[in-house]
Image (cartoon, coloured by chain):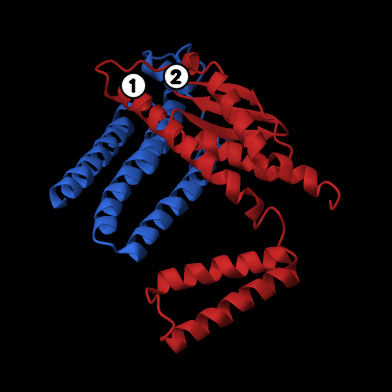
Chain colours: A red, B blue
Amino acid sequence: MNRAFWLWGILFALWMLLSGELSIDHRLLLGFGLATCTLAVWVALRTGTLDRESVPVHLVGRGVGYLLWLAWEIFRSNLRVARIILAPRLRLDPRIVHFQASQRTDLGRFIYANSITLTPGTVTTGIVGDDFEVHAIVGSEVDGSEENDMNRRVATLEGEGDRRAGGSR
Amino acid sequence: MQTLVDALSGALLAGGAFFLLAGALGMVRLPDVFTRMHAGGMTDTMGAGMVLAGLAVHSLASEHWGVTARLVLILGFLWFTSPIATHAVAKAALSGGVRPFTLDGNGDDARAMAGGEGPAGSATAAKGGASS
């Protein structure tokens, strides 16, 4: 139920932001916002899609730190790929490599897979259970140490929240 | 103050343009659909990110908080959706039978590039798929 209030709050904040009118004087706009947000949350409640996966508010706190770290990683790997592409002679060694993921939830795996794809130079092409199939542009440079680091960070990101949810599942 | 803002946002915009250009060059230079995805990822993440950051510097300096928030939202949506699109392209190419180009010659593209005894027809088909 707490989750429903979170969703409503986020949706309404988004509505206020995108409507461009950050004042309470605009009654019509405000009314439409209240109505649509309530309707959306009601539909989510009725269809039972309001769970840890669709509204992962429990990740917000630790997510900020992870996003900052990810942005730094994205910057570094961008420089690496730019250097490869702009070099007079292309030094490619593309190949498919495999990683073991240690996340317990689908949401954790989703975050890990997307993080791998977001850092240029590696793209997740398939997931079977814990086995990640990743295409790397220079396979010989991918020794798995950076991915292990990322894997560990995503596992801590989803971490404790799931032990708490263990009972309710 | 205004000069500083202009310089900072100018540098960010120029940096973004650099990564966009590098990504576009990668599209031309790289051999197959899988390696080109990495170049595409560069324009999505760093190119768009730095351009939006450059714009955000301006909107922050002129205290347009709403505009800044919307720029951040754009970047957020882009960073959430683009890996999914990339993954969909990769998966479609793999299940469509495009074999990744590798140096040791597993794959039609490698054989075609090495001057090829590979089936020319399928190699051109794979290339066509990659460039479209």
- Which of A135 and A150 lies nearest the eye of the viewer? A150
- Give the number of the disc on residue A84: 1
Residue drawn at x 49%, y 13% is A140
Query: Which residue occupies the extreme right position in the image?
Result: A167
Give the secondary structure at mark 2: loop
Residue A24: give x, y in percent of width and height: 44, 82
The reply to whether dot 1 and dot 2 touch (C-beta < 8 Å) is yes
Rendered location of residue A75, percent (x, y)? 39, 33
Q: CA distance from mark 1 to mark 2?
A: 9 Å
Report which residue position mark 2 lands on.
A138
Q: Residue at x 43, y 33 (%)?
A: A72
Residue shown at 44% from the left, 27% from the top: A121
Q: Quick one: A148 or A121, which is closer to the camera?
A: A148
The quadrant holding residue A25 is: bottom left
Q: Indicate the position of residue A7 as horizontal and vertical percent values.
A: 62, 65
Query: Is A65 located above or below residue A135 in the figure?
Result: below
* Secondary structure state at the residue bearing disc 1: helix
- Vertical arrangement, residue A87 with respect to residue B7, above or below: above
Subunit ID for the residue under disc 2: A
**What quarter of the picture does the N terminus of chain A occupy?**
bottom right
Q: Residue at x 24, y 17 (%)?
A: A88
Left or right: residue A2 compared with residue B104: right
Residue B66 higher or lower than A131, as above or below:
below
Of the pair A74 and A5, the residue shown nearer to us: A5
Within 10 Å of the Cα at label 2, are there few (<14), some (14-19), or many (20+) other Cα atoms?
some
Q: Is residue A11 left or right of residue A102?
A: left
Instruction: Locate residue A105, reporting x and y percent.
Output: 72, 42
Reading the chain from its start, which is encountered first: label 1 or label 2? 1
| Residue type at tag 2 | Val
Name the chain under label 1.
A
Would you identify the image quadrant in which residue B62 lies? bottom left
Report if residue A58 is visible in the image: yes
